[in-house]
Image: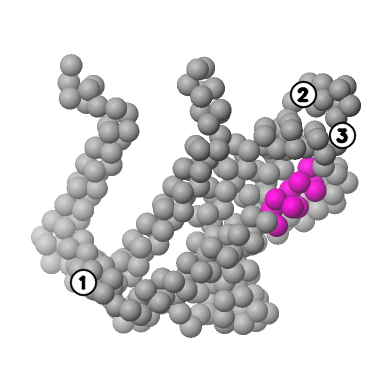
Amino acid sequence: MTLTDRLSPRSQQALLVLGVFVAVTGGWELLVWLTQMPAYILPAPSQIASQLVSMAQQALFWRDFSVTMHEVLLGYAVGIVLALVLGVAIAQLPLLELSFMPYIVAFQTIPSVALAPLFLQWFGYGLASKVVMAALIAFFPILINVIAGLQATGRDEIQMLRAFGGSRLQILLKVRVPNALPYVFAGLELGAVFALVGAIVAEFVGAKAGLGNRILQYNEQFNIAGMFAVLIVLAALGMLMHGLVAFTKHRVLFWVERHDRDA
């Protein structure tokens, strides 16, 4: 029995992830050293790590970090509320689905970058425009999954509850909502990442503070290592938010995981 056979699947995955990280960063560092690549074109991982340490010691960085997190969390919360309310309404009323879904799909195809200047004109350079953009981009994947989950409920379960005199509200709460939760959490996982993307896109277009604004400042200064450092922070934030939603999903939908293991 080899060492990998004794390890759990999660431990094996952790080793693989660590191995890929070491190989990529080591090869990157070696490439920059061998080619003498200028830092304003491609900085070495050691230079990016040094920039990360330097940023972490700056009070201004933590202000930018706080601003972006405020925008993301508010936008994410607004997107969740709107998606849940509209998703339940559309799933319950076929007339609303026929009326609104074509417009929702059409609006979703518009690139977010094209909408950011409009929001900037309407809501200004402050917090509001960033929250609206984050909420809008997080809204669509959550909405689609809410509708799909509520409509995926089996007819037999609904007819059985109706046979016992269940009201429309009881069918929604006792049958449709529990069956829709896996879909809803899938949308929440995507929405968490998209909310971060929306806030950064809005900051690129116009902002007084935030991590997106910091990336633009580093770009003007040809501080490519600083840009990579901020991108690493954003990637870590996205992974953290996605992980928190996934952790909540495992706690709430414990019966789904148990059913999968039994199957």
- In the rendered image, residue 87 lying in the magenta stretch gets the answer yes
Residue 173's x, y, as percent?
A: 75, 37
Q: In this view, does 100 lie to the left or right of 204?
A: right
Asked which quadrant contains residue 213, the reply is bottom left
Is disc 3 placed on a helix, strand or loop? loop
Label 2 element class: helix
- Residue 177 or 27: which is nearer the viewer? 177
Q: Between tags 3 and 1, which lies in front?
A: 3
Q: In this view, does 33 lie to the left or right of 101?
A: left
Most common secondary structure along the magenta stretch: helix
Check the picture and name the quadrant holding the N terminus: top left
Looking at the image, do the residues carrying marks 3 and 1 touch, with CB atoms under 8 Å apart? Answer: no
Q: How crowded is mark 2: few (under 14 residues within 10 Å), some or many (20 or more)?
A: few
Q: In this view, does 15 lie above or below 162?
A: below
Q: Residue shown at 56%/53% (left/top)?
A: 191
Q: Give the range drawn in magenta.
A: 82-91
| Residue placed under numbered mark 1 in the picture | 39
Q: Name the residue under label 2.
A: 157
Q: Are marks 1 and 2 in contact (CB under 8 Å)?
A: no
In the figure, 14 relative to 243: above or below? above
Amino acid tagged 2: Glu
